[in-house]
Image (cartoon, grey):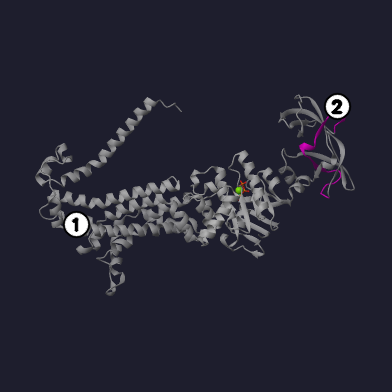
Amino acid sequence: MADVKLRGLRKSFGAVDVIKGVDIDIADGEFVVFVGPSGCGKSTLLRMIAGLEDITGGTLEIDGVVVNDKQPKDRGIAMVFQSYAIFPHMTVRENVAFGLTINGLAKAEKDAKVAEAARILQMEHLLDRRPSQLSGGQRQRVAIGRAIVRDPKVFLFDEPLSNLDAALRMDMRMEIGKLHQSLDATMVYVTHDQVEAMTLADKIVVLRDGLVMQIGAPMELYHNPANLFVAGFLGAPSMNFITVDVQAIEGDLARVSHPALEPIAVAHKGRDIRAGGKAVLGVRPQYLAPVEGPAGMLHGTVALTERLGSETVVDVTLRDGSKIIAAIGEDRVYPTGAGIGLRFDPAQAHLFAVD
Amino acid sequence: MATINPDNHGLRLILRYTVLTLIAVIFVFPLVFMVMSSLKPDQQLLADTSSLRAFLPVGDISLNNYVAAFDRAPVGLFVMNSVIVTGVTVVLSLLVCSLAAFSFVFLNWRGRGVILSVILATLIVPFETIAIPLLLIASKLPWIGAEGVTIGWLNSYRVQIVPFIADGLTIFLFVQYFKDLPGELIEAARVEGASWPQIYRRIVMPLAGPVIATAAILKFLVMYNQYLWPLMVVQQESYRPVMVGLQYFFQLNRAWGEIMAYLSLITVPVLAFYLFLQRAFIASIASTGVKG
Ligand SMILES: Nc1ncnc2c1ncn2[C@@H]1O[C@H](COP(=O)(O)OP(=O)(O)OP(=O)(O)O)[C@@H](O)[C@H]1O
Ligand SMILES: [Mg+2]
C-alpha cells in the first residue's frame, strides 16, 4: 500500500504536448478516478504512472520514492487493461500466476495465492480453462485476479468495464468497489462513465486537454464545480447554462437578469464577475421545478418531453430562444408548445465567469 | 444472405471437393511419376512416358535402381549433409531473425527504423550478385578448431550455414507478425514483472506459431535446394549436399531410373519435415487461438 504523488507531470509525443503539468496527490488506500472527454490524456497519465510511457517532465513518486526512471516491474504496480490483455496461450491459472512465476515464487505459495484470488473473484471453476473459453466478464475477472495476487502497492485500471454490457458492468462495478474495501489498496481508475466515477471514487480528477480542471470528492465536484467545464461534465443530463447580465454585486451575491428570468441573487464565490458585464448562470435540470401559471422564475414553452417513468425530461425553449432542460422527478405529461414556468432555489444555482 | 438449401449445400460441397481433388492430383502427379519411374528399368521407363502407365507400378518392377544409385554415389552421406546444414540453419535462422525482429518491434533504440529499412532493401539483391564477394570473404575467414587456428572456411558445414542464418525475408515475416500482436499483452507482461528476454520466451514466441511455421518452411526449401553456393565452396565429397550430388547421375552413362531413385530418396526428408510442421502448426493454432 502506498501513496502516489504527481508533481508538474508533463508528457509530449514529439511536438504534441499531451499532459501539460499535472499535480495530483493520491493518499494511501484512496480510490481515485480520472475522468474527462476522449483524448484528454487520461490513459496517457495512467500509463505514465505504470511506467509504460516515458515522463517528459515533472516527478512521479510512489511510496515516497521518485520512480520516473524505473521500469514498470520495479514500481510495485498492477494494471488492468481495457482489452484485459490476458495471455491467450496460457490457462486461467497460468495467467493469474504469471507475475508470481516470473518472480520465481515456490509452487506451494503460488498455488495458495492463486486459490485465494480465485476465491475472492469467485472463479475457482475457471482456473483450468483457456481464455478463449471465457466470457467477457470472466476474462475481466482473470485480469483482476492477475493484478491482486501480487499484492501491488497501487492498482491501475484503464476503462476496465467499457467492453461489458450494461448489466454486467454494474455487477463488476460493485465488485471492484467491494474489492477496494476488502483490499484497502490504493487504486487509480480511468473511465469516461460518470456513474463509475461518482460511485467508486473517493476522489475524482477531472481532466481536459492534459490539464487538471478540478480535484475533489464526487459530491464536492457535483455541488461545487470550480468552473464551467466541470459543471457541464458531471451530472446527467448536463447542467443548464444561461448567459445573464450582471446588474450589481452585493457582498457575496451577484444580482443577475435575463429576458426569460426574474432577477435573482446568486453567490459569485469571488469569481471574475463584474456589474454591467456578463456571466453564466448554471442550474442542474434536477433543480428545476415546474410551477403553475406565471409565478415561475424562468418562462418558456415545451419543445419536447421524454417520459422515463421515474422521471420526465422536458426540453424548454425560453423566451429569448435559448434552450434548457428540466428533469422532473415524476411522470408528468406536458403538451408540446404549451407554456411552462420553472422555479429553482438560487442557492442551488452557480454563477461562472464567461470563458 | 440467402438461406441455405441443404440440397444445394451438398452439391456445392461436392463441387468444392472435386476442384480440390483435381488440384491435389495435379500437384501429386509429378511425385507419383518420379516414384513409379524409379522402380522401372530405363527402357520401360522411357516407353511408358507416352501413356498413363507412367503413373502406375506395372511391368518390370524392382528396387534395382535404388541399389545402383547407392553404388554410384554416397546418397546417405549427401542426405545427411543436407539435413545437417538445413536443420541447423533453419533453427539458428528462426532464433536470430525472431530476436532481431523482436528488437525492431518492441525495443526502443535510436536508428532502428533506418536499420530495418536497410535490411528490407537487401530483399531485392539476388544471391548471385553477392556470391563472388561472399566466396572471397569465406575463403579468408579464420576458424579455431581441432587443428588450431586455420584460415578459410571452404569445405565445411559452417560455410554452408552461417551466410544464410540472418536474412531479410525471415526478419520481415517476424516483424510483420510481431507488429500485429496486441500491444497490451506485452505491456501487461512488463507490468507483471517480465524482463524482455522473458517476454520473448514466454509471451511472444509461444504466440508466434504460424509465422514460425511459415518462416521455417521457406527457409527449409531454400536451404535444402542449395546448389550454386555449395558448388562454389565445397570441393570435398564429405560436405557435399544433395543437389550437388545430383551431378553424379548426369556424368557418363546417364540412367533415368537411377536419377528418379535418387530424387525419390532425397524427397523423404522434405516430406517428413512437412508432416512434422503441419502437426506442430495445427497444435499451435489450436492452443493459442491466435488466427493467422
Ligand atoms: N503514442 C502516441 N503518439 C502520439 N500521440 C499520442 C500517443 N498516444 C496518445 N496520443 C495522443 O494523446 C492524447 C491523449 O490520449 P489518451 O489515450 O491519453 O486519451 P484518453 O483520455 O485516454 O482518451 P479515451 O477516453 O478516448 O481513451 C490524444 O490526443 C492522443 O492522440
Ligand atoms: Mg484511454
Whether A60 is drawn above or below A347: the answer is below
Q: Is mark 2 within 8 Å of ligand 1?
A: no
The region drawn magenta spans: A270-296
Q: What label does residue B75 carry, if any?
A: 1
Q: Is residue B104 left or right of residue A229?
A: left
User: At which x and y percent is residue A279?
Assistant: 81, 43
Image quarter (top left, top right, bottom left or bottom right) of the N terminus of chain A: bottom right
Q: CA distance from mark 2 to mark 1?
A: 108 Å
User: At which x and y percent is residue A242?
Assistant: 78, 38
Q: Nearer the viewer, residue A265 or B129?
A: A265
Residue at 57% over, 59% down: A72
Residue at 57% over, 43% down: A137
Tell me if residue A278 is in the magenta stretch: yes
**Helix, strand or loop for disc 1:** helix
Q: Looking at the image, can residue A32 be seen? A: yes
Q: Nearer the viewer, residue A50 or A171?
A: A171
Disc 1 residue type (three-letter) = Val
Residue at 25% over, 42% down: B28
**Helix, strand or loop for disc 2:** helix
Disc 2 residue type (three-letter) = Gly
Tell me if residue A17 is in the magenta stretch: no
The outermost residue toward the bottom is B148
Query: What residue does disc 2 label?
Result: A293
Give the crowd class for mark 1: few <14, some 14-19, many >=20 residues within 10 Å. many
Chain ID, mark 2? A
Q: Is residue B262 left or right of residue B218?
A: left
Observer-side mark, 2 or 1, equals 1
